[in-house]
Amino acid sequence: MIRAPVDDDQEDRVSDHTTAASAEARPVALDELIARCRQLIASGERRILGIAGTPGAGKSTLSSALIAALGADAVLVGQDGFHFANQELERLGRRGRKGAPDTFDIDGYVALLGRLASPPTSTDAPPVYAPIFDRALEESIGSAVPVPASVPLVITEGNYLLNDDHGWHRVREHLHESWFIDVAPEVRHERLVRRRVSFGHSADASADWVREVDEKNAEIVETARTNADLLMHLTTVL
């Protein structure tokens, strides 16, 4: 990960990484995370915060809450915008494993993070555009999220930000800080089934997908939890 020189205000983050290495999640409230974001961008320079966790951990919900609190100081760029298109997954024979580590355009994602991590030449520089994943369509939509040069914090969230295989290790090179959300398996399982049902899938098909696909991906995600600067479970209900 990108590391600025450590000063007194960063000691807590160094301590958090020691905690993360023990694989014990620390309870945190939303207000603390908002304050942490504000400290991260106190210099006014562009910073990238990575939020990782298993499918259904609440990454998108937390990211949205942070964006709402930070306003114009932050923008969300999700890993899911780099899903391979369904047509390409069919060609590769991976359609039934959508969401696995090798079903994303990792090269494109890393390239975009590199552009976002580079200091804008001026606040008048044109925005950088990012894709977004439409869950109703189950496809990505390109150039849907403008990232103005004036925005100091880019929040990126996704399952594999802290993993190593299939080229994912390159993501951490562009993160100034990373968090991992810990959540009970039964909670995320219920969330995932409910989410798929909300997008028109049957309850049985949703449960099958979560068991056969999401749970297998979750096992992979869990192996990288100790790579986070902050390993947490959120105490604030969102």
Image (cartoon, rainbow, N blue to C red):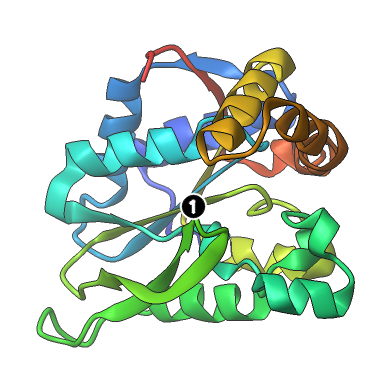
Q: Position of residue 14 (x, y in %)?
A: 53, 37
Other-residue count near label 1 (Cα within 10 Å), few / some / many at <14 / 14–19 / ≥20: few
Q: Residue at x 51, y 52 (%)?
A: 135
* Image quadrant containing the N terminus: bottom right
Q: Position of residue 45 (x, y in %)?
A: 25, 65
Q: Residue at x 27, y 72 (%)?
A: 146
Q: Residue at x 52, y 41 (%)?
A: 199
| Residue at the left extreme, as displayed | 124
Q: For this rendering, which residue is in front, 173 or 101?
A: 101
Exactly how many numbered labels are in the figure?
1
Q: Secondary structure at mark 1?
A: loop
Q: Badge 1 is on which residue?
A: 136
Q: Position of residue 147 (x, y in %)?
A: 27, 71
* Image quadrant containing the C terminus: top left
Q: Residue at x 25, y 81 (%)?
A: 120
The quarter of the displayed image where residue 12 is located: top left
Q: Amino acid at mark 1?
A: Ala
